[in-house]
Image (tube, rainbow, N blue to C red):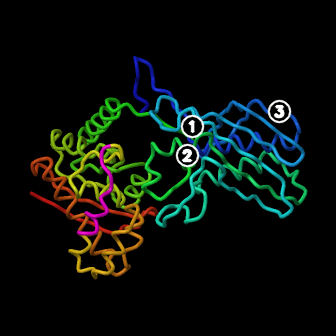
Amino acid sequence: MTGRRNDRPLRSGYTTGACAAAAAQAAMVALLEQKPVERTELELPGGITANFKVTKCLFSNREASCSVVKDAGDDPDVTDGAEIWATVAWKEEAGIDIEGGKGVGVVTKPGLEIPPGMAAINPVPRQMIASAVRKAAENRLDGKGLRVVISVTDGAKLARRTLNQRLGIVGGISILGTTGIVIPYSIDAYTACISQALDVAVASGCQTAVLTTGRRSEKFAQGELALPEVCYIQAGDFIGFSLKECARKGLAKVIVWGMIGKLSKLAAGHFYTNVSDSKVDISFLSELAAGCSIPRETVEVLRGAVTATHFRKLLPPKYIKVFCDKLCQMAARKCMESVEEKLAVECILTDSEGVILGRGHATG
């Protein structure tokens, strides 16, 4: 689903992680070859090859620095046009160290994928950067190691337009991305695809639709539920629209499958779950926890969570199921009420590995 803008397909772009890896790969080549690099080809997760223009290239015998300007395609991305630098330098010890430089944020609070004190370069981009440097080195390291520093021009300024400060990431932007590709979505195109997918499901005899919040959730759901493939709909942030379409098309039941962030928004009555429209309410989750007989001192600790996932990780193990079941029950009730009880709704909550943590049902 790429949508359209001015009667042309919307153009995909590349993540900050992909740009950082491309810059690092170019810098490695410049360091080894001692000559400027103008372009570099990078293999992205999933086997796709992308070609990047190297904007600037500086090198000496000890280190090389290259920059790539991020092109987010037609996605309205804060970091579109950002200049992302990678400096690759020799070090005596074997191994590749990846660090953040100027313009890359530092994590200061627990609960994110990167622990406090480290640069906000997420795990997949770190893997991409290391892989790109190794590939460029082509076994020519001769036992030496490498220090890779990722920097972003005006990164601190760009970060003011993101949620980084609220999440405890200070001093710059995050280096993100799991696929390397930014896919722009037109709302009209996305919702039209949901509606068409539901038409196919109904025409195939499905009475139950499974609304998932993304590709990972869909994969988890397909591994657990014995339903035909056409019953699974990637609703993304458009759960409210999808529920109304399910009711309009006469389905009997909807299963909403997601993780704690999205389901917490549904439980609070927010049916468009994009961060631009609704944010996770930690106070709401804390009040819900208090209603699960969780000790007051534990609830006070939970109030300090910075994300929904962090909140879930702070829950004592013996309270996870009761809390997650209650959250799912509330989300299912809110979803059913949003379509005037024309659908039975079940909500299923998993962790990032697909382990089911809670379930809740609502019927008219």
Place of residue 49 in the rendered image (x, y in percent of width and height, measured from the top left): 65, 37
- Give the amino acid type for the residue marked by disc 2 in the picture: Ala
- Residue drawn at 46 percent across, 53 percent down: 165
Mark 2 or mark 1: whose residue is earlier in sequence = 1
* Separation of marks 3 and 1 at Cα, in angstroms: 23 Å
Location of residue 186 (image quadrant): top left
Q: Which mark is residue 36?
A: 3
In the rendered structure, does residue 278 fall within the stretch colored magenta? yes
Mark 3 or mark 2: whose residue is earlier in sequence = 3
User: What stretch of residues is rendered in magenta?
Assistant: 277-287
Classed neighbour count for the residue bearing mark 3: other residues with Cα under 10 Å, few (<14), some (14–19), many (≥20): some
- Give the amino acid type for the residue marked by disc 1 in the picture: Tyr
- Residue drawn at 49 percent across, 61 percent down: 112
Residue carrying label 1: 14
- Of badges 3 and 1, nearer the viewer stands 3
Residue carrying label 2: 156
Location of residue 356 (image quadrant): bottom left
Dot 3 lies on which element?
loop
- Give the amino acid type for the residue marked by disc 3 in the picture: Pro
Place of residue 121 in the rendered image (x, y in percent of width and height, measured from the top left): 59, 54
In the rendered structure, does residue 152 fall within the stretch colored magenta? no
